[in-house]
Amino acid sequence: MDDLLTDFLTETSENLSVLDVELVEFERDPSNSAILQDIFRLVHTIKGTCGFLGLPRLETVAHSAENILGKFRDGALEVTPGSVTLILSSIDRIKELLGVLEETGTEPEGEDGDLIQMLNAMAEGRAAATPVPAPAKKKAKKEKEAASAPATADVGFPVAAELLEEVAAAEAAGIKAASDEALRAAMEAERMAETAQTAAAEKPAATPVIEAAGADEVDESEDGASGSGASVGKRSGSGSGLRKEAEGTKESAVASHSIRVSVGLLENLMTLVSELVLTRNQLLQMVRGKDDSEFKVPLQRLSLITSDLQEGVMKTRMQPIGNAWSKLPRIVRDLSVESGKKIDLQMIGADTELDRQVLELIKDPLTHMVRNSADHGLEGPADRLQAGKPEKGLIRLNAYHEGGHIIIEISDDGRGLNTKRIRAKALAAGMATEAELEAMTEQQIHQFIMRAGFSTAEKITNVSGRGVGMDVVRSNIEKIGGTIEFSSKEGSGSIFTIKIPLTLAIVSALIVECGGERFAIPQISVLELVRASAHSESSIELINEAPVLRLRDRLLPLVLLSHLLRLDGGAKAPDLVRDEKFIVVCQVGTYRFGVIVDRVFDTEEIVVKPVSPILREISMFSGNTILGDGSVIMILDPNGIAATTSAVTVTREDATEMDERHVAFNEEVTSLLVFRAGNEELKAVPLALVARLEEIDLASVEHSHGVPMVQYRGHIMPLVPFNPGHTWAAAGRQPTIVFTEGDRSMGLVVDDIIDIVEDRISVELKAEEPGLVGTAVVAGKATDVIDTAFYLTRAFSDWFGRPGGGMTRAGEGRKGQRLLLIDDSPFFRNLMRPQLSVAGYDVVTVEDAAAALKLRDEGAEFDAIISDIEMPGMSGYELARELRAQGPWSALPLIALSTHAGERDMAEGMAAGFNEYVAKFNRDELVATVDQAIAQHALRGQGGVQ
Amino acid sequence: MSVRAAVRKEAQKDTPSSVSDVETREYVTLTIAGQWFGIPVLTVQDVLGPRDVARVPLADPVIAGSINLRGRIVTVIDMRKRLALPPRPDNKPGMNVVVEHGGNLYSLLIDAVGEVMEVPGDKYEKNPATIDPLWRDFSEGIYRLKNQLLIVLNVEKLFEVGETRSN
């Protein structure tokens, strides 16, 4: 039998047994939407899988059952015992079909018209199965009782017993929560009035479907309901019980090549093995150095076996994620045949191992998501060609370990999320009001797809579109402590990122010591180790008590672990600058920081064990572990440390609302130096523009032409007070921000250096005030972002094009040259416009590609175009392609501007038609590049527009 | 899970487990700062002598740290801190009584473990009204024994860190 089919059978029979219980539970509490969702999902899964496996009978039955469940969920249909019974009969039919399928490998012949008809009738609201006649049931019960329970019913108090029966029957017919048997019997009566009574009395005569589970349910429900009824039920149901048993043995035959062992047992085994390893190590230690020990040889064997055993037990828990993916190619293939789409499924990192329990739990969500990508995400070949994409759509799965987590990315290059449609749907479904939607970002609107019952598919297909999907995926992932994030760009695809913690994976960890305690840091987030002391090359510096380290010309924020974990016990902070310290440089996402520890030991393979629930609130730890020497240590969570120490927390708190990754799509993370000057308001300047932070000894300040200056590194550095009315103290130290270009420096005198903050900034304009670019919210506080160009020109009016330099000539030549700057971020527009203007260009700025294209169509003329890459709507790449494709600007120099200037980005930029690629903030390079591009353009003789 | 199993499970939940029954019960007796406590013998998984406890930074003060019990990590709760009693003298390391709660192991760090004692149900009394409110949370009732009063610890409550602390 096909592997896929075998898997399906095992999985489905498990699902079905869950379903039985859930349905009964649901009948008791029809308002429980959680159960309904579960039931719905299970049926949906069965239906979906049947579709792929080509099992039409199963599929149609499941489909019809799902229809009813869908109505339940939408509240269109009231949950009545009759309808639940009907669903149960469909489940039984499915079981029956599965039984044959398992035996023969094919679906049995025949059709389920009767059942489907009833299901459809029910779905349409025609109460085809209203439970009316109780007599059938009563009679049945009585006969059964007479036949098989004479002791209590006959000899005892027959009248009373019968009366009780009648009361029970009346209740059953009248009240919703009727016994299954009554309903089943009632339904049979409805369906085949004539055979009903005999069917109930002599089970074998009834239709096989209803009979099988009918009898079984009688058995079960009576057992629960009344003790005396149990024997009755059991006996009358024994015929089908046998049948059940037979089915059971068949099931086990399929599963015989593997057995299911409880995870608890495996965990226990693993614990014991770890203990065994420790004991062995102790023994080895004792024997070591005694060459003639008689234990030596047996101990060696013990050692080997223990190692093998350990490895074996570890293996039982770990599985490559590829196991969960194995079904996907087939599913995608079938889907592509069915929908006529061409789909390329790429799977990267299939050998990434993860805990089998976790693996089981993400299997379904993953399958769902890939189906979603294939069904909703990718367009048909014609649409793709029209959109300028390759005919073949791409779905890419990528799994890897990161910082003690497993990351699984599912991306496609399809049409992306349709914001408009989601919006409309959310509005229609009453999930949000028009006003609320108005205030939402695109990203927030996208989040609606994670809500229950949300689906934008216009037609319900076999594959998806019933609103089973992202909400279920999310809840499943969250159940195992994972998160799901996504970003989507209309027209260019979506990427879903699932992050799952390793509950029991083995990771390589760096063992460090701090405050006399040892800790493990997952090696995966460690970039490098730096030893810092006053005598070594790198030493820790302090910005208002906040330690930083100069690491290869970048300032690295540092975290004092002993302080963070309150291990210093209130003792005097160590002398960070002088004492020898070890710094573990960590990276979380794009955020880099250093953790100061006392000592660094070795790297060890550790088994991550979840921390006790009582400790779970401490975000600094991702788990704990037992080291080789038997001691228990905590595993530090670099994410938690980063979250508590940086502005990342701001976005993290409302991570459900705002998706960090997506925000990063539009707004780049910027490091800002926050300081105070002039007044109490916070000011900030992009750190990348800052050369150095100094404290100037005021005694050394000299004046020349009334301008205060100091000697700095062999040159004269003018000091510009931030506040023109600054009063200079005679002595003391003054914090100063130094900007440098070539051999010239300028010191901006401020009152206080506050902090370095890494944040996504969005600047609100306040253009009226000179010297300020605008106001931004930085780390939750309103902060003025200063315009450095303003202060630079105050120190040297010719800062941006000084005479005598090579730039002057170019600068003069630049006069009147027109540049178009496209950047969605007002901050960058405002930062760069002055810089470029000062360099001699006429600069026009627009905020997106659409505005740029409008300018082109209006006939505007430029000498060169500088464009950001990540922009909402049309990206820089797309814009470049568009510009190159046609129109008057097709030959203009195009310069890409981006914060990430990786090689791949560059290559992509060049491919899209950019001439140059410049990193943001690098003004010199930008100006030089623009010059060069314009010059080359002129040389090529293609003619400037000017 | 069959319906029957579900029903059975439900039935089990309803079984009363309070100590007010008249029947005799068995307790492991412990001393903490001179006071006798008892915990039902069946809840005790293990009794360990003094162990090196690894501190857990940032944890609630009642958590002494964690120990390794045959490869499983056990969170140690300092009962003196939990009951707001003065700390144990340094020269007297405590004993560990290991219990399971919600699938995790916890150890109660106490002064000494006594014998397993059968106590007759008729000696049982509810918490007196004057008992310290903090202790009332942890006590399920009191047995009047000949020489001493035995406080029955409500083990579940001991793990509610953070919520009861303000009491």
Image (spheres, rainbow, N blue to C red):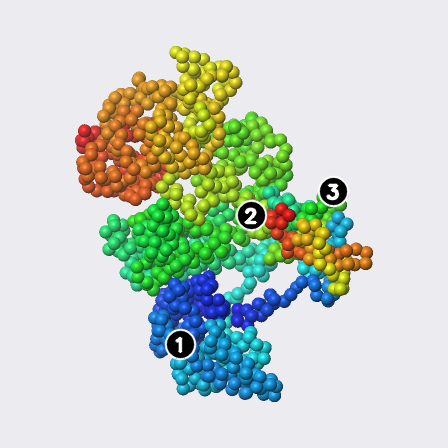
Mark 3 vs mark 1, foreground winner is 1
Give the chain of mark 1.
Answer: A
Give the chain of mark 3.
Answer: B
Asked if both marks, 3 and 2, belong to the same chain, the answer given is no
Residue A406: image x %, image y %? 47, 50
Q: What amino acid type is highlighted by mark number 1?
A: Ala
Determine contact: label 1, label 2, CB under 8 Å: no
Label 3 vs label 1: CA separation? Answer: 76 Å
Q: Secondary structure at mark 3?
A: loop
Q: Which residue is mark 3?
A: B90
Q: Secondary structure at mark 2?
A: loop
Q: Secondary structure at mark 1?
A: loop
Residue A273: image x %, image y %? 61, 56
Label 3 vs label 2: CA separation? Answer: 30 Å
Residue A494 at least partly seen: no
Classify the position of the C terminus of chain A by image quarter: top left
Q: What amino acid type is highlighted by mark number 2?
A: Glu
Nearest the eye: A15 or A912:
A15
Q: Which residue is mark 1?
A: A129
Q: Which residue is mark 2?
A: A617
Classify the position of the N terminus of chain A by image quarter: bottom left
Q: What amino acid type is highlighted by mark number 3?
A: Asp
Residue at point 33%, 19% (across, down)? A797
Residue at point 49%, 21% (across, down)? A734
Give the quadrant of residue A452. bottom left
Give the chain of mark 2.
Answer: A
Q: Label 1 neighbourhood size at 10 Å, few (<14), some (14-19), many (20+)?
A: many
Label 1 vs label 2: CA separation? Answer: 52 Å
